[in-house]
Image: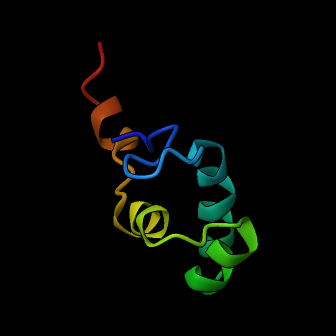
Amino acid sequence: MIIPIRCMTCGKPVGHLWEKYKKEVSAGRNPAKVMDSLGLERYCCRSLFLTHKDMIPEVGSFRK
């Protein structure tokens, strides 16, 4: 649901990069180049960003 603060495999802090990544990709940039520019070099960190599904809008609709 929410991007983890740290990579679950290597422990690198990645949570602060999610908004920048999402903004750049939605603007039409290549996700690989965006991850390179953000300093995400390891496969574990890159897979975390590629496989993450932002579900806050869906889950937020059930809030009372």
Identify the residue shown where x is 60% and y is 72%: 41
Residue 61 in which image quadrant: top left
**In the rendered image, the vertical position of residue 17 relative to residue 59, given as above or below:** below
Identify the residue shown where x is 72% and y is 66%: 38
Indicate the position of residue 20 as horizontal and vertical percent values: 69, 57
Residue sitting at the far right: 37
Residue 51 placement, left or right of 25 = left
**In the rendered image, the vertical position of residue 60 relative to residue 58, given as above or below:** above
**In the rendered image, the vertical position of residue 46 relative to residue 32, given as above or below:** above
Indicate the position of residue 23 as horizontal and vertical percent values: 66, 63
In which quadrant will I find the C terminus? top left
Residue 48 in which image quadrant: bottom left
Indicate the position of residue 1 as horizontal and vertical percent values: 33, 41
Residue sitting at the far top: 64
Identify the residue shown where x is 60% and y is 44%: 13
Q: Is residue 32 visible?
A: yes
